[in-house]
Image (cartoon, rainbow, N blue to C red):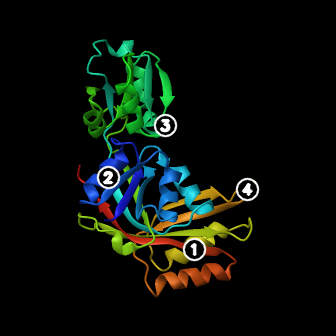
Amino acid sequence: MTKIGYLGPKGTFTKLAVDTAFNNEEKIAFTTIPECIDAVADGSIDIAVVPIENAIEGTVQLTVDYLIHEVTLPVAGEIVVPIQQHLLVSPDFTGELSDIEEVHSHSHAIAQCHQYIHKQLDSPAMKFTTSTGRAAEIVAQTDRPIAAIGNVLAAEEYGLRIMQHNIHDYPNNHTRFIVLTKNKELVKIKQPVQSEKTTLKITLPSDQAGALYQILSAFAWRKLNLSKIESRPTKTGLGNYFFIIDVNQTYDEVLFPGVKAELEALGCEVKILGTYPVFHMDI
């Protein structure tokens, strides 16, 4: 049976994405994103599903940097999930919002609800956890007047009460999760493919005037549509960056090799991180 790893424990949005996308594969929770990615690299599991970007908070930098600098695995798919953040409390909690002393959750989840926390709660202490599921687990294990930010699955899994629904600051809240595996044939997602995407890493030879313009031109005149471009430090010194570029098209044998050849002629290093289907989940 195919083994799928995800950022746990149970009740995380990653688990929600995995449950929605896959059928009866064995699902294994990991405490951190690096542990999940390492498990694919060393063969302990077949597939890892990890968050890569949130519509409100942007890139999950830990995921990107770990894939670039520590473990190299191809991206075999993308799962887009709508995110609904709720305020979760113990079923025995009978107090008011102002009585909540601490709010536990992942840093991204807390940031997504910043305005709600600022306006509705009475300056509670912010406690960052490895995941929203872990935050719910902490609340379930104590009688103290604390709360977690998480989803319906977390509330059900840990027997918590949803005190306030949909507390995220912006309604169009989605998170992208990437599917990592050494064997693309094992990825059998039960939802229809919405689109195709190719992700590239491009490293400049040096800091030179017009370099980014030249990179973008290689895509533009071939009419390749870019959905994202982001710079990240190479970790070799201040001012040294590489670019992650998402192209809304599957890799072909004409346009992409042309882009690669043109950029390499400029002295750039080009690496294909994956060409893969994109799935949008209706949860």
Mark 4: few/some/many CA within 10 Å (<14, 14-19, 20+): few
Contact? badges 2 and 3 (CB < 8 Å) = no
Q: Mark 4 points at which residue?
A: 239
Secondary structure beneath dot 2 equals helix
Tag 1 near tag 2, CB within 8 Å: no
**Which of the marked residues, 2 or 3, is nearer the chain's N terminus?**
2
Frontmost residue, 13 versus 213: 13
Residue 56 at x, y percent in the picture: 43, 44
For the N terminus, the image quarter is: bottom left
Image height check: is 107 above or below 148? Answer: below
Residue under numbered circle 3: 107
Counting residues from the start of the chain, the first of labels 4 and 2 encountered is 2
**Mark 3 or 4, nearer chain start:** 3
Mark 1 and mark 2 lie on one chain; the one further toward the N terminus is 2
SS assignment at label 1? strand
Check residue 2 in the rendering and tell me which mark sits there, or answer none: none
Left or right: where 188 falls relative to 230: left
Q: In which quarter of the image is residue 18?
A: bottom left
Q: How far apart are marks 2 and 3 (CA)?
A: 19 Å
Estimate the spatial distance between the alpha carbons at disc 3 and disc 4, rounded to whole Å. Answer: 27 Å
Q: Is residue 183 toward the left or the right of residue 214 in the image?
A: left
Select label 1 or label 2 by which is in front: 2
The answer to whether mark 4 and mark 2 are in CB contact below 8 A is no
| Mark 4 and mark 2: Cα distance apart in space | 36 Å
Report which residue position mark 1 lands on: 271
Q: Where is residue 42 in the image (x, y as percent from the top left)?
A: 52, 64
Q: How far apart are marks 1 and 2 (CA)?
A: 28 Å
